[in-house]
Image: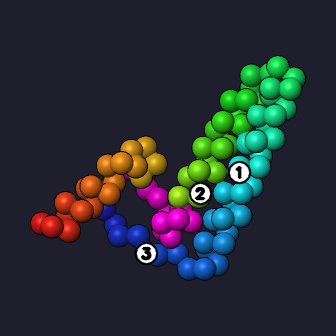
Amino acid sequence: MIARRSRLGALNRTAALLLALTWFAAGLFALVIGFARGLWLPVVCGVLACGYGIAWSRVVARSRLLGWQDLVAPWRGGARSARRRRA
């Protein structure tokens, strides 16, 4: 059974927004350094950091913490919960 996640308050959403912006900035910085110096490791880390920033921005937009199902297959999360509400 999946536990229902409660909505986040304003303070938690602000913290999630700061985390999203920080991860985006770090990812972009790593991408610039990686491409400028021709190194592949900073590029890979930059892409992963930007992806993590996207995940935190989804937390801000949905106002709740995300589970693994939401991160791995976000297109399936909404349909599954809508089916449960109808049943």
Q: Which residue is mark 2?
A: 56
Query: Could you say whether the residue bearing mark 1 is in a helix, strand or loop?
Result: helix
Please state the extent of the stretch shown in magenta in the rendering: 59-69
List the residue tagged with mark 3. 6
Residue type, label 2:
Trp
Q: Please report contact status of discs 2 and 1: CB closer than 8 Å, yes or no.
A: yes
Q: Counting residues from the N terminus, which is met first, the one under dot 1 or under dot 3?
A: 3
Element type where label 3 sits in the image: loop
Label annotation for residue 79 = none
Please state which amino acid type lies under the numbered disc 1. Trp
Q: Amino acid at mark 3?
A: Ser
Q: Is residue 65 part of the magenta span, yes or no?
A: yes
| Number of dots carrying numbers | 3
Horizontal and vertical percent for residue 12?
61, 74
Q: CA distance from mark 2 to mark 1?
A: 9 Å
Identify the residue shown where x is 40% and y is 49%. 74
Q: Residues within 10 Å of mark 1 (few under 14, many from 20)?
A: many
Q: Is residue 62 found left or right of 79 in the rendered image?
A: right
